[in-house]
Amino acid sequence: MIKTRHICDYCHYFIMSLTLSNAEECDVGDIADIHLASFGENMMLQAQFPTPALRAGLRISLMEKAREEIRDPQWAVLVVRNQNEIISFAKWMRPVLDADSYVEVPWRWPEGTRMDILNEWARKVEDASSSVIGSTPCYCLSFIGTHPRYERRGAATMLIQWGLERSVKENVPIQLESTIVAWPLYKRLGFEDKKRILMQLEGLRKDGQSVLYEELSLVCKPEVASTILNRLTHKSKTD
């Protein structure tokens, strides 16, 4: 368990004591709630789960999947706490050395999910990942979320730093998909924008017009991760 004190990047007067640890099965409800609080306004989530009932069902799916990942040694599910309250989480998939021997537990989506949208987006994400990283073993950040009340206070950086440290130690890259909103944080932490992922979403705007949804496929190389870690270590010593 890592315990540290972080100063808000933009509000240096605000100090919190944050603790990073592995998630336990009893944490899955908090993880699901933070996921929905973080991504509830995301256009892709709204397109795939367009009603309140579906989003309530999604919460159950998120809990079930988090529980399976916590049990799976191929995954590292992490949480950040402020005192005893979970405020942020991340799901890291460790490098898969033999893709033929590992089978991930599938998602179980609520009935009524827009599977046409979900499957098309999943295909686009997979195509982008194959294009930028191929079959190279890597750490993959599947999901990361911070409760909106605690944004920009260092929790996400702690969770990403966990992956940077293992990238350097094991000499493997990191790959992930980022929303446009999150891109500045990843850029600051050494990630490169390798490919745009685009999909037209119909009827999401109030006027019924379509929306072009975009995410970025990012990569961070071990040598870049090492430089970033040195910078973060120096910053923590001078704060």
Image (cartoon, helix red, strand yellow):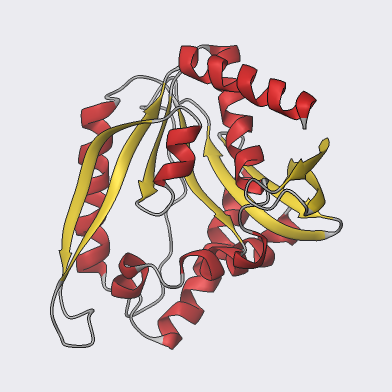
Rendered residue at 61%/58% (across/down): 151
Identify the image quadrant of the C terminus.
top right
Rendered residue at 52%/20% (across/down): 225
**x, y percentage for residue 163?**
57, 30
Please state which of residues 85 and 188 is positioned toward the viewer in this rendering.
Answer: 188
Identify the image quadrant of the N terminus.
top right
**x, y percentage for residue 195?**
23, 36
How many marks overall? 0
Up-down relation of residue 129 to residue 24 (above or below): above
**x, y percentage for residue 33?**
61, 69
**x, y percentage for residue 152?**
61, 53
Up-down relation of residue 159 to residue 101 (above or below): below
- Answer left or right for 83 relative to 150: right
Up-down relation of residue 155 to residue 188 (above or below): below
- Answer left or right for 17 relative to 128: right
Please state which of residues 181 and 95 is positioned toward the viewer in this rendering.
Answer: 181
Residue 160 appearing in the image = yes
Rendered residue at 57%/36% (across/down): 160
Up-down relation of residue 216 to residue 189 (above or below): below
- Answer left or right for 94 relative to 5: left
Residue 141 appearing in the image = no
Quarter-of-image position of residue 204: bottom left
Rendered residue at 51%/11% (across/down): 171
